[in-house]
Amino acid sequence: MRIIELRNKEIINADDGCRMGFLHDLDINMEDGRIEALILKGTGKLFGFIGTDNDLVIPWKMVQKIGKDTIIVSVPERYLK
């Protein structure tokens, strides 16, 4: 699979069934070329016009399945706070 194919996939949390958003970026280990984490864009302040809150970084080990349109992850609630 190519990185560009991952970009348009929606992230779904299997722990609570919540839609988390769309993949924004990847953290890649440049030494071995492995994906370390998925990065989702933080929520916007003032309807997205004034910056964003912190991005959500989901470690690769939390990825359960990559489907045609979605990426299923298992992110515990305590990780989201």
Image (tube, rainbow, N blue to C red):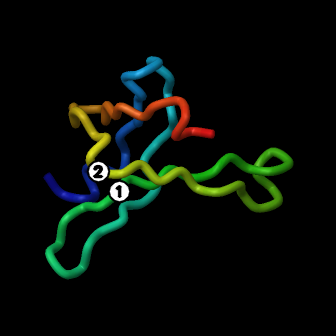
Query: Residue 33, relative to residue 8: is it above or below?
Result: below
Q: Where is residue 51? Give x, y as percent.
A: 76, 61
- Up-down: is 1 above or below 73? below
- Residue 70 seen anywhere in this rendered image of the structure: no
Residue at 25 percent across and 50 percent down: it is: 5
Mark 1 and 2 residues: CB-CB less than 8 Å, in contact? yes
Q: State whether residue 8 is above or below residue 37.
A: above
Q: Position of residue 54 (x, y in %)?
A: 65, 57
Query: Which residue is painted at 14% across and 75% down in the image?
Result: 32
Residue farthest along the right direction in this orientation: 46
Is residue 19 something that shows in the picture?
Answer: yes
Residue 79 pos. (x, y %): 52, 40
Query: Which numbered disc covers residue 60?
Result: 2
Q: Report the side of 26 relative to 34 (left or right).
A: right
* Residue found at the very far bottom of the displayed protein: 31
In the rendered view, does 65 fall on the left or right side of 75?
Answer: left
Mark 1 residue type: Ala
Return the residue nearer the eye: 69 or 13: 13
Q: Quadrant of the C terminus?
A: top right
* Residue visible at 24% across and 79% down in the picture: 30
Q: CA distance from mark 1 to mark 2?
A: 5 Å
> Considering the numbered disc 2 on the image, is that residue within a helix, a strand or a loop?
helix
Mark 2, Cα crowd under 10 Å, few <14 / some 14-19 / many 20+, is: some
Residue at image mark 1: 37
SS at mark 1 in the image: strand
Mark 1, Cα crowd under 10 Å, few <14 / some 14-19 / many 20+, is: some
Say which of 37 and 9 sits in front.
Answer: 37
